[in-house]
Image: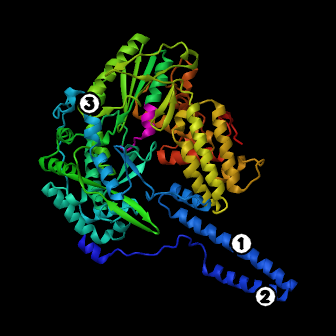
Amino acid sequence: MYHFNVHFPLTKIKVNANCKSWITDSIRNKKATLVSLSAQARDNKDDDTKEMLKCKRKELKQNVMLEKKKFFDRKIECSTNLIKSTWQIINNKLGRKLTGNNSELLLNVNGRQISDPLCMAEVFNSFFSSAVENLILPNLPDNLALNENSQSIHFQVNKSFYLQPVNADVVSAIITSLSNKFSSGHDDISTAILKQCGKVISGPLAHLINSSFVTGIFPDQIKIAKVIPVFKKGDPHDVSCYRPISLLSSFSKVYERVVYNQFVSYLESNCLFDKEQHGFRSGKSVITAATDIVQSIIENVDKKKKVAAIFLDLSQAFDSVSHPKLLQILENFNIDRLTAAWFKSYLTNRKQYVEILKQNGKQVNKFQSSQRLIKYGVPQGSILGPLLFVCYLKGLPSVVMGNGKVCLYADDTNLLVTEDDIKQLELSSFLNISNLIQIIAQKNLLVNYEKTHLMQFSTKQKSNKETNLKILIENHELDQTDSTKFLGLTIDKNLDWTNHVNTILSKISSGLFALRRMSKLSNLKTLKTIYYSLIHSHINFGISLYGGTVKTNLNRILKLQKQAVRIMLNLRWRDSAKIYFAQLQIPTVFASYITATILTAKKFIEISDHPIQRYNTRNSRYRITGHHNLEFYKKSPTYIGLKFIQRLPDHVRSEQSMPKFKKKLITYLTARALYSIEEFYEPDGP
């Protein structure tokens, strides 16, 4: 750090907050000409001069607007966080002042008000670093909390894993792949700076990484985390209402990425991940996890089974990981002695401090607490942390018995149980959730019963006839609800999805406001980028599932899509938007639903042993779903996706390459600008 500070010393610069960056020399010259011409008009009172002044004002106004658009277009185009940049521009234009420097932060601790920033930093650091010891461990079952060697799940691996040396080219490629961020850890070296000198330092850095592997030691200086407290909700004077955001050294990310790439390849090639785990894995996502659960619900309801799901919430799961237990699990993966030492060095002796910014006039000062040791958890904000947590839960699905099924996305744990009658369902749910919670507790993880929900699924016709389940765990009766948050979706007991659609509409409305404001400051290309970021992303997330809702819900989304198109093209509110969807290459919500279900169906059939039927017809190369009992089954993304595939034109359907098939499919459906599912089935699209 000494050499870094010598060559890159910190300097104070004066920033003009009112600087209008879009003002160019050309505009300044025209402004000066306008002022001179205005003085002449006042002196001469000449009609010709006044007319010329009027034209010059109009010309200046047009040039200012043009330069503004160019400036904001460049800002958004070069932004690494488009949503944040867009709202910064809008808030700046509206005169909204955002508080991000804790200039008025006050804390109440034991009835005493604290305003000194250094004392507040110490209070935050004390609370964050001891949260697991004070809030999690005391609430675990007494016979499990301190049993460091208690492991009910065992597995055997024959092949050994060891860390392999890397060269400068690999390190350089990893540095290049890092996100271009300006935030930094305790060393004040951001990834943006690291990427600027990546080619120069990749050789020495590769040598340091290889030395770390050979010695089994992860450097202490890049274990230090800088923590920024960010307000969540509730009382702003209560320290528990803040979330710790950890910033690690950029060099740590390079070390971790090297290990991550090698370790995840070993885990995948040896099938060491639980198949029920969808978190932080290639080819898996939140949507694949949600599809797995929803598909099972639909199939069992169609078979007239009793179906219940328990959505578990774990308190501070990543921060509660026991290092000895995690290291034991890693050893069960058959990692060699030196690699085990490296992981132990990586996890232990980590420290953190809290930094608070305080504004004093025009100057912003930093206040840092002392460093505290972190005894539990995987490093927050790290690359290896999520992968290690997935390893920590290895074997959890194996404790589920009978007709139970677990679906995991990192710490999101969801249990699905199906039985023939309500009594069996209640008993099976109790036994399986008890087993899960016991293993979870053995891993030092605490269930938050207030946010853990029970839901019983059925068709709308039978929903009023269902008997509520009563499941009592650790003196807590699970709350049975009709709707709950589930992996970013709002799921309900009838898979109606109306609540989720309402949430989407709210987000789209916010995006429309941003789009309307930016339409005066940006060109069409930038507006399309904003549309995809603030509107289309919300529509597309999980649409293969919630798209099975009633047509009126999809029409509500389509209505707002039409508004977005009219805003981007400055159309009148009565103008038809249908032809412009194809021109802008924006898929309607119906096109997005058809695309998502087709892609889901193709992937699901390839990787599953889902029962299918084949017929010796001209379409025999395409799979056709079997018999179903209820209309409810049509909500299944695989069922409806296969029906859609059969109605695709030959030039799309016959494509064997998945990337090319996806591209042709999107192009075909976008060009049709579908306003309903029925339009898709018409032989000659509009």
Give the residue at mark 3.
Answer: 140
The amino acid on which the numbered mark 3 sits, given as a three-letter code, is Leu
> In terms of secondary structure, where does tag 3 sit?
loop
Q: Residues within 10 Å of mark 1 (few under 14, many from 20)?
A: few
Q: Residue at x 25, y 74 (%)?
A: 3
Q: Work out whether residue 366 or residue 212 is closer to the camera in this orientation and state it.
A: 366
Image x and y of residue 420, in percent: 42, 12
Q: Residue at x 26, y 65 (%)?
A: 168
> In terms of secondary structure, where does tag 1 sit?
helix
Instruction: Examine the rendered structure and indicate whether residue 103 appears above or below residue 32.
Output: above
* Segment colored magenta: 280-292
Q: Which residue is farthest right?
A: 47
Q: Residue at x 42, y 47 (%)?
A: 237
Instruction: Examine the rendered structure and indicate whether residue 190 appears above or below residue 22.
Output: above
Image x and y of residue 276, in percent: 35, 33
Question: Magenta includes 631?
Answer: no
Q: CA distance from mark 3 to mark 2?
A: 84 Å
> In terms of secondary structure, where does tag 2 sit?
helix
What numbered label is drawn on residue 313?
none
Give the residue at mark 2.
Answer: 40
Asked if residue 596 lies left or right of residue 39, the reply is left
Image x and y of residue 265, in percent: 28, 47
